[in-house]
Amino acid sequence: MTQQTQQSKGGKEVLIISGAITVAFVIFGILFPDQLSSGSSWLFGFLTAKFGWLYLISVSFFVLFALGLAISPYGKIKLGQDDDKPEFSNFQWFAMLFGGGMGIGLVFWSISEPIMHFLSPPSAEPGTTAAMYEAMRTVFFHWGIHPWAIFATGGLALAYFQFRKGLPFLISSSFEPLLGDRIHGPIGKTIDILAVFATIFGVATSLGLGAGQIVGGLNNIWGIENNTLVTSIVIAVITVIFTVATVSGLHKAMQMVANFKVWLSVAFMVFLFIFGGTVFILNIFTNTTGGYFGNLIQQSLWMENESFIQGWTVFYWAWWIAWAPFVGQFVARVSKGRSIREFLLSVMLLPAGFGFIWLSIYGGAAFNLDAISGGAIQAAVGADYTTGLFATLQQLPLYALTGPLAIILILACFVGAADSATYVLAMLTSNGSMNPSKNSRTAWGIAQGAVTIILIIAGGSTILSILQTVSIVAAFPFMFVMLFMCYSIIKALRTEKI
């Protein structure tokens, strides 16, 4: 049997096993939603209580690994052959990195998270000015350099072994220095299955939050009831839309959606910056940026308030690890011809910097308008955290226009994330093919929607808890994959002539 035949067979094995696990999960969730919910709660408590420290140490290591590698002599090595040139101009590349950071999560949490931390801060007195600044610093921490160091590490492995070593665009390829040809065997396929598992549930978390925010907006604007059934219907309808678009080959339409999402996002930022309190926002940005960098090392390993760390930071670190195959694939594909140093520093710092501006504008406007309105926004978030964005826009002019536009923005982010995740899942189960079949993409699109709906049903009124749980559980084994991946990258780089 030739190596190509073995790889093809291995790709089918990954597809069959991953598909079987997904189908089994969906069936179990349909038949035993209560057991899924209770089992998830137990797993959440066990992993966060026993291994929360490991998530913090591992993610801190990824930051040090990426920074150390970027400034080392290996940083000048190209992601490609020595004479390869970047496929995109610097402006195009930077724009795509920024675009990769504008997803459902950032739209969802940019107002709700600061307000939630303000009401229940890690250490400050709730509802005080100190709590506001601590809340913003915590949000910067969760959306700053740490997550992008995770994505940069995963993306580096994919880009280096694909573009420089000519291996399949698979997570398992990054273990070639350690496993040799065994990356095409059971061990390699297990790694790829773990990547699929992490991607499914990491993205399902985002889709679940996005759907909840859409329904929260529909309730806020038009009074449509916010319940599990309506949320599930929203997910099902959007799943049909992006799946049909994928099957029909409407690539231009999807590109238009992506471009529209970027411009609408920028429009909202400008609108909030102008009408949400410009000076207040600039003060928030300045103070929080200084506090973020001044407390970065201590906050990276801070566990004094364990319940807060387990419910927020551990959840985020797990969520980002689960997203590593997804976002890593995106940043790798657009970075051929870049040096390792250029890649790592740009991926870590540019999207994080953009995120700081985004969060300062949204969070700053929310705090300013909340004070002006006598606490209307914190009251809304306290009652339903999915309505934070709409409660903020409601305090500004043109809500009859901006409210529906906000729902459209979330829909665009939802469709974009689901479409990209479907493509990545199809690629991971097609032996790293850059152009997976439409059948594969269709199947994974439907599966992604089904998994998200099951999580919504199982979560019920505690949906955030079960979404946190699946991210943490999915990321746990993949965290070890990424740690060994770092060692494998170093071993491969040592063979380079520098």
Image (tube, rainbow, N blue to C red):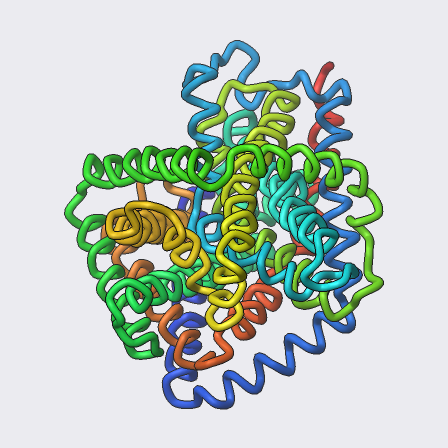
Which is nearer the eye, 415 or 18? 415
Relative horizontal placement of residue 481, taking residue 434 as reference (left or right): right
Rendered location of residue 64, percent (x, y):
77, 37
What is the total number of numbered labels drawn onto the structure image?
0
Q: 408 above or below 282?
A: below
Confirm whether residue 193 shows in the render. Answer: no
Rendered location of residue 19, percent (x, y):
39, 66
Which is nearer the eye, 342 or 137? 137
Q: Which quadrant would residue 203 be assigned to in this image?
A: bottom left
Rendered location of residue 198, percent (x, y):
53, 59
Which is nearer the eye, 166 or 475? 475
Q: Residue at x 77, y 59 (%)?
A: 124
Confirm whether residue 159 shows in the render. Answer: yes
Quadrant containing the C terminus in the rendered view: top right
Q: Residue at x 34, y 52 (%)?
A: 410
Q: Residue at x 58, y 71 (%)?
A: 469
Q: Residue at x 51, y 67 (%)?
A: 379
Q: 253 above or below 192?
A: above
Which is nearer the eye, 138 or 360? 360
Rendered location of residue 287, percent (x, y):
70, 37
Relative horizontal placement of residue 221, taking residue 184 as reference (left or right): left
Relative horizontal placement of residue 2, taking residue 184 as reference (left or right): left
Residue farthest along the left direction in this orientation: 248
